[in-house]
Amino acid sequence: MQATSPIGIFDSGIGGLTVFRSIAGQLPQYDYIYLGDNSRAPYGNRSFKTIHQYTWECVQWLFEQGCPLVILACNTASAKALRTIQQRDMPGRYNDKRVLGVIRPTAEVIGNYTKTGNIGVLGTKGTVQSESYAIEIAKFFPEVQVYQQACPLWVPLIENGEYDKPGADYYVKQYLDELLSRSADIDTLLLACTHYPLLQDKIKAHLPESIQVVAQGDIVAASLQDYLHRHPEINDQITRNGTRHFFTSSDDTADFDQHASMFFSAPVKSEYVSLK
Ligand code: DGL
């Protein structure tokens, strides 16, 4: 690999590709490295300690590859590990590097989507239990009601390639019914897990047309563009050759390549990385 200082994009698995696609589309000039920790996904049902440990290992690996900036394209890691990484792990060791998450940029704008003032937030167990969305959205839109729903079986379905199969409909409907039974006024549904856009067609099929579904990719990409504009000290460190490299901790790189190629509408050849 040529010597680059790319932007690192991290997710527990393939979900972060939904964010990476938007980022690379909006900011094509930069170099990027994507890391999916597929062998240890899903993170969503794991403890705080484990999610932090895995996320920090991945972030450090991306730092070692020369990334001055890492995006946690994972809500679970953003909810459970980001603050500890920013406030405890990095100071004194990585002062010239930055790690950003996806929750704050989403919370900053999501209130603008609702007319009824009622938002449904779909996420992993970890994201929902952390209450991060309820807390962050309340800071920017105190009048908005947030209804959270954990969907613990969706990421395993997606990571196992079942997201477009008929069996997935059962679990999509189950969690949506649970959420909608708690409020008839929800008009906006946030996919607060970067894997969930892969189920978007099925999710929409189970919803009345009055409910709009919002995915995070474009929101995070716009926020990153703004961040780079405001932070030349980071922006100037990132190289711009338009390269994209993909790494996965899964032995099955072919499976990862198949998903990534679909997302990027171009052949993707990932490399295996051992994180232990
Ligand atoms: N894509 C992730 C998220 O946004 C994580 C899913 C998981 O590993 O459980 O939360």
Image (tube, grey):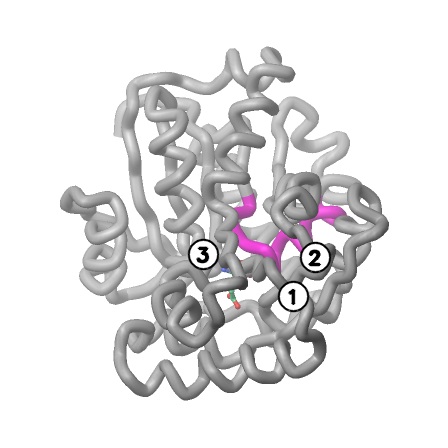
Task: Name the kind of residue labelled 3 in the image.
Answer: Leu
Q: Nearer the viewer, residue 43 or 93?
A: 43
User: Does the numbered disc 3 mark a residue whose Cβ is under 8 Å from ligand 1?
Assistant: no
Residue 275, label in figure = 3
Name which of mark 3 and mark 1 comes first in the sequence.
Answer: 1
Residue where numbered disc 1 is placed: 186
Name the spot of residue 242 as percent of width and height, x first: 29, 23
Above/below status of 177 relative to 102: below
Label 2 neighbour load within 10 Å: few <14, some 14-19, many 20+: few
Q: Amino acid at mark 2?
A: Thr
Label 3: which secondary element: loop
Which quadrant of the view contains residue 131? bottom right
The part of the image, by quadrant, that contains residue 106 is: top right
Q: Residue at 38%, 67% (x, y): give it.
A: 199
Part of the protein shown in magenta:
72-85
For numbered disc 2, what is the local secondary structure? loop
Sort mark 3 into few (<14), some (14-19) or many (20+) by Cα contacts within 10 Å.
few
Residue holding disc 2: 116
Residue shown at the point (21%, 53%) measured from the top left:
262
Residue visible at 36% across and 17% down in the picture? 240
Closer-to-camera residue (60/98): 98
| Labels 2 & 1 near each other (Cβ < 8 A) | yes
Q: Is residue 218 above or below residue 262?
A: above
Of the two numbered discs 2 and 3 on the same chain, state the one appearing first in sequence.
Answer: 2
Inspect the magenta stretch and tell me whether residue 178 lies in it: no
